[in-house]
Image (tube, rainbow, N blue to C red):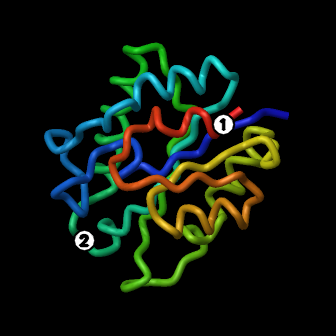
């Protein structure tokens, strides 16, 4: 079985200061420490997976194509640094518009990744900046690390073995 670190996207990997929704590549800035931390997690043998709520799609603020452009830009920047994101999972729903089973705090997207990539939740982590990230991780059996929005990701290295 594999081990993985799951990441919320906005506020953890991408700086969301001044933006509730980030859907334009011009607004995408990686938080401090992201590249170095992801390189370290990779060297430690962790798969890297992003789990993100993207409720702006359901609210018709932006489209799935916007989300895919952001993810492609993230992938490009990470690959230039030798970092491979195993998968991007996102929920396009919002509880104000519709009910679903994939929006965090529900663990469905994490559970899909656990099954698809044969990941052992007992040796895997989730890093999030919101209580719903932590709740989803707990329900899936992951060790959970809550950070402040836009905190330097290098601050959590000592919490992951």
Neighbor class of circle 1 (other Cα within 10 Å; few <14, some 14-19, many 20+) is few
The quadrant the C terminus occupies is: top right
Residue at 41% from the left image edge and 47% from the top image edge:
12
- Quadrant for the N terminus in the image: top right
Disc 2 designates what residue?
Answer: 60
Q: Earlier in the sequence, mark 1 or mark 2?
A: 2
Q: Which residue is more in the foreground, 58 or 51?
A: 51
120 vs 160, nearest the viewer: 160
Residue at 40% x, 31% y is: 34
- Res 101 quadrant in image: bottom right
Element carrying mark 2:
loop
Would you say 102 lies left or right of 64 here? right
Question: Which residue is tagged 1?
Answer: 160
Q: Element type at marker 1? A: loop
In the displayed structure image, the side of residue 107 where residue 18 appears, left or right: left
Label 1 vs label 2, nearer the camera: 1
Residue name at image x 65 percent, y 59 percent: 137
Instruction: Tell me if residue 152 comes above or below residue 53 in the rendering.
Output: above
- Residue lying at 52% horizontally and 31% vertically, measured from the top left: 85
Q: Residue 65: give x, y in percent of width and height.
A: 30, 49
User: Does 72 sit left or right of 19 as displayed?
Assistant: right
- Which corner quadrant of the image does residue 129 belong to? bottom left
Measured in 3D between alpha carbons, the distance from the residue under mark 1 to the one under mark 2, in whole angstroms, is: 38 Å
- Tag 2: Cα neighbours inside 10 Å, few (<14), some, or many (≥20)? few
Is 145 above or below relative to 153?
below
Residue 72 % position (x, y): 35, 34
Q: Is residue 51 above or below residue 4?
A: below
| Callout 1–callout 2 Cβ contact below 8 Å | no
């Amino acid at each position: 079985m594999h081990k993985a670190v799951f990441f919320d996207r906005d506020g953890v990997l991408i700086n969301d200061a001044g933006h509730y929704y980030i859907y334009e590549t011009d607004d995408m800035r990686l938080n401090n420490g992201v590249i170095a931390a992801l390189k370290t997690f990779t060297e430690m043998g962790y798969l890297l997976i992003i789990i993100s709520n993207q409720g702006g799609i359901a609210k018709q603020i932006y489209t799935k194509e916007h989300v895919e452009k952001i993810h492609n830009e993230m992938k490009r920047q990470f690959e230039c640094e030798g970092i491979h994101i195993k998968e991007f999972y996102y929920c396009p729903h919002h509880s104000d518009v519709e009910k679903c089973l994939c929006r965090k705090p529900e663990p469905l997207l994490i559970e899909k990744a656990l099954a698809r990539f044969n990941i052992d939740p007992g040796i895997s982590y989730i890093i999030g900046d919101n209580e719903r990230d932590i709740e989803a991780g707990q329900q899936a059996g992951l060790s959970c690390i809550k950070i402040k929005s836009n905190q330097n990701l290098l601050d959590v290295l000592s919490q992951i073995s």
